[in-house]
Image (tube, rainbow, N blue to C red):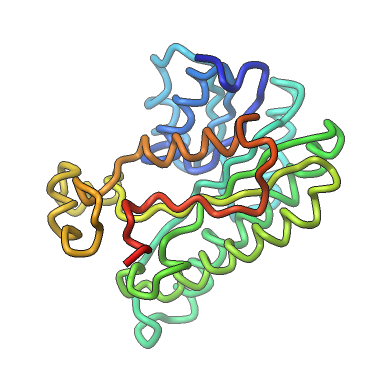
Amino acid sequence: MERLQNKVAMITGAASGMGLAAAKLFAREGAKVAATDIAVTQLIEETRNFKGDILALELDVTSEEQWRIARERVIKEFGKIDILINNAGVSVHKSLLEEDLEGWNKAISINLTSVWLGMKTVIPYMQQNGKGSVVNCVSLAALVGGADSGAAAYSAAKGGVRSLTKHAAINFAKDKIRVNSVFPGAILTGAVRKHGVTSQEQLGKAFQNIIPLPPHAGEESDIANAYLFLASDESKFITGEELVVDGGWSSN
């Protein structure tokens, strides 16, 4: 299939997890992909033998200068940017009373400021092209108070991304730039595996009384496919929308 034929996509946080799954899926669907991550060595290794058009770039998403450099590299290599996937993020499980100012600022910077910087850097080029699609990764934590595992700063940042997405959708619709968001629920990612969880079924056991749809947890490809739909022309009349991928968790 070639749902992204002749498209150029820029994806953050692509060295592992949902970002890596999206980079490979987008390339299989015909896109030229600029996969970016601060862990560029890992990113290069993960994409080295992949048979698809993936350019691995180093990017600290909290740095405006690095965003500018990465954007110029993508424009030089591929000539344009049609799609921006703001996937990068980090969660530290500290409650509102436990969190300190340094941790708060770090969480806001990586999870929220990075999304603003990405759109601020890339959208002007989409305006020149006359269209574009931005997809921001939010979180169920922005919708459900108990879904953040006590991570207050993360929850606040993702709530900000939710609002910023709607702001951008309204303000850039006139430029034929669509801005949508994806809300992952319980997903088996590399970060989860670091805690000893090795399968969807194992993760799902912790959510079987919360998430109605078996196996009660999702996988990275579920989010990658959500990104793909919103990035593609299949969603050409959709903007400002929230695609929740949570197995029904938020319906409880």
Question: Dividing the picture into quarters, in which one does residue 223 lie?
Answer: top left
**Residue 239, placed above or below residue 16:** below
Q: In this view, does 75 lie to the left or right of 33?
A: right
Q: Is residue 11 left or right of residue 204?
A: right
- Furthest-top residue in view? 51
Q: Position of residue 41 (x, y in %)?
A: 43, 32
State the residue in front, 69 or 140. Answer: 140
State the residue in front, 159 or 212. Answer: 212
- Furthest-bottom residue in view? 97
Q: Where is residue 242 in the image (x, y as percent from the top left)?
A: 54, 54
Residue at 67% over, 17% down: 6
**Residue 242, placed above or below residue 27:** below
Question: Dividing the picture into quarters, in which one does residue 125 lie?
Answer: top right
**Residue 110, placed above or below residue 23:** below
Label count reads: 0
Residue at 67% over, 57% down: 116
Q: Which quarter of the image is occupied by the C terminus?
A: bottom left
State the residue in front, 227 or 64. Answer: 227
Q: Position of residue 87 (x, y in %)?
A: 51, 46
Residue at 53% over, 72% down: 105
Residue at 65% over, 57% down: 165
